[in-house]
Image (cartoon, rainbow, N blue to C red):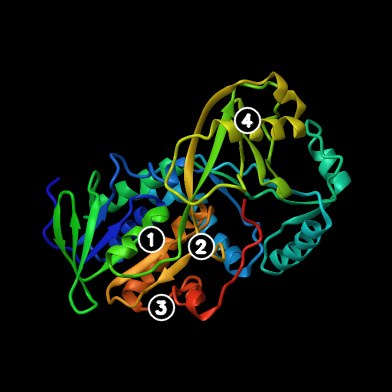
Amino acid sequence: MDTPKTADIVIIGGGVMGASAAYHLAKSGIRNVVLLEKEEFFGTGATGRCAGGVRYQFSTEINVKLSLESLPMIERFREEIGQDVGYRQCGYLLVATDEKDANAFRHNVEMQNRLGVQTQLLSGEDVRARLPLMRFEDAIAGTWNPKDGLADPNSVVAGYVSAAQKLGVKALTQAEVTGVRLSRDEVEAVETTQGVIQTRAVLNTAGPWAGLIGEMAGVEIPILPIRRQMFTTNALKEIPEDFPFVIDFAQSLYFHREGEGLLIGMSNQKEQPGFDQSVDEEFEMENFEAAMERMPLLERASRASHWAGLYEVTPDAHPIFGGSRVKGFTICAGFSGHGFMHGPVAGKLMTEYVLDGKFSTVDVSMLDLRRFEEGRLITEYNVV
């Protein structure tokens, strides 16, 4: 496809945020939309390298409200978009092994229940009864929501891109953005490796690379790329089909069923910001050893595959929605590890903002860029 010379809006970043925004903008009647992705395929950046988890269990009301809108969109994705995304409600089981986390869990469950999310608080005994294959002698409490689960990130992106193209969106791959031209603090054009696109509106959905795009427009965006990695195992016949997404909260160690085996990951607390997406083999061994401590049968397992991706982390682990000091330069990024699950509603929200200057489906106005300089941070506790 030839690069368009002009656009009503240029979306930078072809992951779930950009794809959802492209679809929702076109659906609302804005057809001269250009979606740019620097890689060969859409959704192969941060979105395509995530664990695919979707959940209602968060520690702030705004994140729970985003889940309440976004997860049902994933649930009815096939009906609306025509793409099966493999949504499987296996449930999330978060496990607390210290009193601080246990107290936070109790508070979180109360808040989630108040908002209509039916998360259940479990005792340590409940946790051990539900996870007979795991060693959780130190479990104090747990939280369980059977409607949490998994979906396929690549299918969600592909579905949105295909639906957007049918509505007239021009979606380009291998189109890396090299500059954002301004005229008197207003967007004038986007420079790419495939040509220049004249536009008065840019939506930055570049995920871990959103800060770099911001620099091109002279906008400081406090998003840091942090490597996260995971691996899968060979088939393990002992793992039941209804095995939940288990999170050992204190260690940021997680397990979920992947095919006939498991997908396992853990946050490296020593990881420094950067764009390295290679696998740290030394840390992978630490992850594997921690996993074996919790699930002894892994001593007989072998690794099937492994990969690394990037979290896009903000100072308060919440995303950035809305405008900037540069007229026409808007941002939807910084989801700090839970962007895939909130991508569907995020695209809808940014469409509302572009059309009406406000957010209607969920009021995310407090998650603006200015909160960082004004000290209005809203910290999310349930980040893995």
Q: Earlier in the sequence, mark 3 or mark 1?
A: 1
* Residue 361 x/y as whole percent: 48, 71
Q: CA distance from mark 1 to mark 2?
A: 10 Å
Q: Earlier in the sequence, mark 4 or mark 3?
A: 4
Look at the image and tell me in which quarter the N terminus lies. Answer: top left
Q: Earlier in the sequence, mark 4 or mark 1?
A: 1
The residue beneath circle 2 is: 314
Q: CA distance from mark 3 to mark 2?
A: 22 Å
Report helix, strand or loop for mark 4: helix
- Mark identifier at residue 285: 4
* Residue 109 x/y as whole percent: 74, 62
Query: Which tag is nearer the camera, tag 2 or tag 4?
Result: 4
Circle 1 packing at 10 Å, graded few (<14), some (14-19), many (20+), is many
Query: Which tag is nearer the camera, tag 3 or tag 2?
Result: 2
Q: CA distance from mark 2 to mark 4?
A: 28 Å
Circle 4 packing at 10 Å, graded few (<14), some (14-19), many (20+), is few
Residue at 33% across / 57% down in the picture? 23
The amino acid at mark 2 is: Thr
The correct choice, above or below, for 372 with respect to 171 in the image is: below
Q: CA distance from mark 3 to mark 1?
A: 23 Å
The residue beneath circle 1 is: 211
The amino acid at mark 3 is: Lys
The amino acid at mark 4 is: Met
Residue at 42% across / 53% down in the picture? 208
Residue 167 visible from this viewpoint: no
Residue closest to the eye, 22 or 369: 369
Q: Earlier in the sequence, mark 3 or mark 2?
A: 2
In the image: residue 194, left or right of residue 245: left
* Residue 241 x/y as whole percent: 67, 31
The residue beneath circle 3 is: 358
Q: CA distance from mark 4 to mark 1?
A: 31 Å
* Circle 3/circle 1 CB separation < 8 Å: no
